[in-house]
């Protein structure tokens, strides 16, 4: 019985360590900044910043996180939960895309509410409290867009994105101090 509890606790610690590096924070910070810059400049090129956010996340996990804390294979229960998370994200993206095509005044509050609920659900399912805050930030940004329009919406995205980016950099710095890169051969 205690061995089973210890395994569950170890798996939970491994899962939460997945968020200790700050790369989720950096990801969402870059996303918001990209949205703000794209809207302010009206230059489609800046949309590719989203791919930059994905790249930072993937490469950071691979070259910074994994060498320091390793990789874990989760049990069937956690894997099932991960699959549910992926399905929720895909459905949410489809809903957001369909709401984005409406561009009516009523679509903005619905999008804001949807973002808050989505991030809260992800925060709960992924056991990552930052998602609750980010859901609120994305929702507030969406409300600013709907009420004040441009340039206030993009400026809000830039400000919120910069704050999240700074949080991500602080978390990453703490992670690097806590888990120095192992010496080759050690």
Image (cartoon, grey):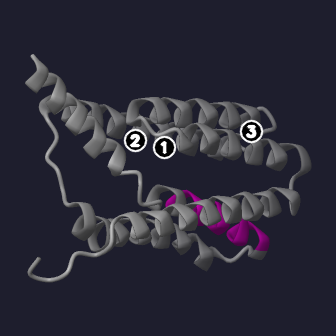
Residue at 40%, 31% in the rendered image: 125
Residue 39: name its quadrant.
Answer: bottom right
Residue 170: name its quadrant.
Answer: bottom right
Return the residue at label 1. 93
Return the residue at label 2. 90
Residue at 63%, 58% in the rendered image: 164
Counting from the top left corner in percent of width and height, residue 161 is at 67, 61
Asked if 19 appears above or below 105 in the picture, the reply is: below
Asked if 130 appears above or below 176 in the picture, the reply is: above
Q: Which residues are magenta?
A: 27-40
Residue furthest to the top in view is: 1
* Neighbourhood count class around disc 3 (C-alpha, 10 Å): few under 14, some 14–19, many 20 upward: many
Residue furthest to the bottom in view is: 184
Q: Are marks 2 and 3 in contact (CB under 8 Å)?
A: no
Q: CA distance from mark 2 to mark 3?
A: 20 Å
Rendered-image quadrant of the C terminus: bottom left
Residue at 40%, 51% in the rendered image: 19
The answer to whether residue 35 is visible is: no
Q: Is residue 101 magenta?
A: no
The answer to whether residue 98 is visible is: yes
Label 3 secondary element: helix
Identify the mark nearer the N-term, 2 or 3: 2
Nearest the eye: 17 or 123: 17
Q: Are marks 1 and 2 in contact (CB under 8 Å)?
A: yes
Asked if 39 appears above or below 41 in the picture, the reply is: above
Counting from the top left corner in percent of width and height, residue 67 is at 23, 70
Label 1 secondary element: helix
Identify the mark nearer the N-term, 1 or 3: 1
Return the residue at label 3. 108
Q: Is residue 36 magenta?
A: yes
């Amino acid at each position: 019985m205690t061995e089973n509890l210890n395994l569950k606790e170890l798996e939970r610690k491994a899962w939460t360590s997945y968020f200790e590096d700050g790369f989720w924070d950096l990801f969402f910070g870059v996303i918001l900044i990209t949205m703000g810059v794209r809207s302010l400049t009206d230059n489609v090129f800046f949309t590719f910043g989203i791919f930059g956010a994905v790249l930072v996340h993937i490469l950071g996990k691979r070259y910074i996180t994994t060498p320091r804390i390793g990789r874990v294979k989760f049990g069937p229960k956690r894997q099932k939960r991960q699959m549910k998370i992926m399905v929720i994200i895909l459905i949410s993206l489809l809903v957001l895309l369909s709401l984005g095509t409406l561009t009516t005044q009523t679509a903005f509050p619905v999008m804001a509410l949807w973002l808050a609920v989505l991030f809260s659900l992800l925060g709960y399912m992924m056991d990552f409290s930052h998602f609750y805050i980010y859901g609120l930030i994305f929702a507030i940004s969406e409300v600013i867009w709907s009420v004040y329009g441009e340039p206030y919406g993009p400026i809000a995205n830039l400000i919120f994105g910069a704050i999240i980016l700074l949080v991500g950099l602080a978390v990453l710095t703490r992670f690097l101090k806590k888990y120095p890169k192992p010496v080759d051969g050690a």
